[in-house]
């Protein structure tokens, strides 16, 4: 059994039988837990919160099977990559998305070309959870799935690099890794200040405050790797790429085991270590350096792999898709379509192989 309830949101690209990005909104009609994203070639598969790995696996597998069958019925495929490899130029398909386009301008392109995974953890000791999940940001290297962005080979996690930095300096506070929280009230004040900044930026682009207030709440204005969701209520971890569901389940279980420890153990700053009575995490500047190494080099960085092992991850359990996407420095549209279809094949095989693990456990029971 998990000590904390866990839910998953997995974004997937939709392509036609030739590998071209295409409209996936029809697939979202197949199941209440499948939703369209703010551009047509992206959908999101969600689960309810679960208190066991087995039940989480069951629901994710069942909903993905429904999504894959619905796509097949339309002559389409689903692709688990952090980026579409080349570029999607699809316009926003909803009022909130169109407001984002108006506010961000050309800087919205990175949001349109990134697909991630969001893992929701039940709130317990919120500040310790926020800080621990922030410290686990380098774990994105375990599931990085695309080293291509806009057709160019670059960072190991091209999604994280683009999503956090390509929006422009004035918007980076909404997308980049945030400093640790000092207290819950300080975190909430920080989010409120960002919301005020968002409204000012919107006004500069001619979007009136009433529209912003109708479409955006403070908590969904920030798109950072860790978010506090008051409405659910959960602590949301947004660091990982979209990737194969088996790898996401492995990561969610490993991270839940760590986050659950905050119920009985303190989170402190110091030399990274898992002690019997506390979890020690690095100071923010050291963490930030590790995160950039994880984005740029993934598990090829000795420092990143050593840190993740220190934090309790068995890195041998992971096979990041990015390491399999070998190819030229510049990727043509034709080559990108071929690779998307290859990853669609991998997704379908992975979903088929999500066999039941009958043991219900938490790595670190309370």
Image (cartoon, helix red, strand yellow):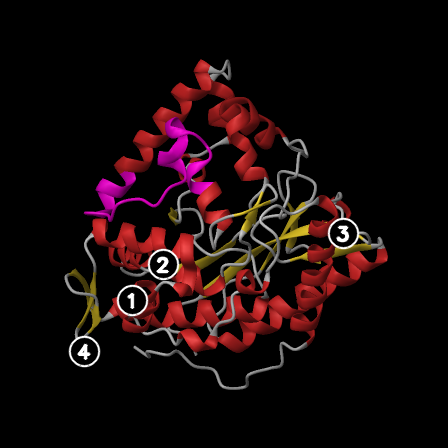
Q: Residue 169: within the magenta?
A: yes
Q: Which one is earlier in the sequence, the residue at label 2 or at label 1?
A: 2
Give residue 263's position: percent from left, percent from top.
26, 68
**Vertical placement of residue 277 versus 340, above or below:** below
- Distance from disc 2 to disc 4, alpha carbons, whole Å, reads 23 Å
Q: Residue furthest bottom?
A: 359
Is 363 or 176 nearer to us in this picture? 176
Task: Residue under label 2, please give it.
Answer: 138
- The residue lying at 48 percent from left, 53 percent from top is 157
- Residue 276: numbered disc: 4
**Vertical placement of residue 134 versus 193, above or below:** below
- The residue lying at 69 percent from left, 57 percent from top is 339
Q: Residue 34: within the magenta?
A: no
Is 138 or 151 nearer to us in this picture? 151
Q: Which one is earlier in the sequence, the residue at label 3 or at label 2?
A: 3
Q: Which residues are magenta?
A: 163-188
How crowded is the residue under tag 2: few (<14 C-alpha within 10 Å), some, or many (20+)? many
Q: Which one is earlier in the sequence, the residue at label 2 or at label 4?
A: 2
Task: Residue under label 1, please give it.
Answer: 307
Give the structural element (helix, strand or loop) at label 4: loop
How crowded is the residue under tag 4: few (<14 C-alpha within 10 Å), some, or many (20+)? few
Give residue 196's position: percent from left, percent from top.
35, 25
Q: Which one is earlier in the sequence, the residue at label 1 or at label 4?
A: 4
Give the structural element (helix, strand or loop) at label 3: loop
Q: Which one is earlier in the sequence, the residue at label 1 or at label 3?
A: 3
- Residue 19: numbered disc: 3
Which quadrant of the structure image shows residue 189? top left
Frontmost of labels 1 and 4 is: 1
């Amino acid at each position: 059994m998990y000590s904390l309830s866990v839910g998953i949101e997995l974004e997937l690209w939709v392509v036609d039988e030739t590998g071209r990005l295409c409209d996936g909104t029809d697939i979202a009609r197949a199941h209440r837990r499948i939703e369209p994203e703010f551009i047509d070639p992206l959908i999101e598969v969600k689960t309810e919160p679960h208190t066991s790995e087995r039940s989480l696996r069951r629901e994710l597998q069942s909903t993905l099977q429904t999504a894959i069958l619905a796509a097949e019925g339309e002559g389409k495929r689903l692709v688990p990559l952090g980026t579409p490899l080349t570029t999607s130029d699809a316009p926003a398909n909803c009022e909130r998305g169109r407001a984002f386009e108006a506010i961000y301008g050309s800087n919205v392109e990175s949001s349109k070309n990134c697909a991630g995974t969001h893992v929701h953890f039940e709130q317990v000791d919120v500040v310790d959870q926020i800080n621990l999940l922030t410290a686990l940001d380098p774990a994105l290297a375990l599931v990085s799935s695309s080293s291509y962005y806009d057709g160019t080979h670059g960072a190991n996690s091209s999604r994280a690099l683009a999503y956090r930095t390509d929006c422009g300096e004035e918007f980076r506070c909404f997308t980049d890794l945030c400093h640790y929280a000092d207290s819950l009230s300080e975190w909430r004040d920080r989010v409120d200040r960002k919301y005020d900044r968002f409204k000012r930026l919107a006004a500069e682009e001619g979007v009136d405050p009433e529209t912003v207030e109708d479409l955006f709440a403070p908590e969904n204005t920030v798109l950072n790797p860790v978010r506090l969701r008051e409405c659910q209520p959960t602590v949301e971890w947004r660091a990982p790429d979209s990737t194969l569901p088996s790898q996401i389940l492995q990561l969610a279980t490993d991270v839940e085991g760590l986050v659950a420890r905050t119920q009985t153990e303190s989170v402190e700053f110091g030399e990274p270590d898992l002690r019997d009575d506390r979890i020690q995490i690095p100071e923010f500047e050291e963490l930030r350096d590790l995160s950039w190494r994880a984005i740029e080099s993934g598990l090829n960085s000795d420092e990143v792999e050593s840190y993740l092992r220190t934090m309790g991850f068995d890195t041998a359990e992971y096979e990041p898709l990015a390491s399999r996407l070998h190819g030229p420095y510049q990727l043509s549209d034709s080559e990108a379509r071929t690779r998307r279809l290859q990853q669609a094949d991998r997704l379908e095989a992975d979903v088929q192989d999500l066999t039941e693990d009958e043991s219900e456990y938490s790595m670190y029971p309370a």
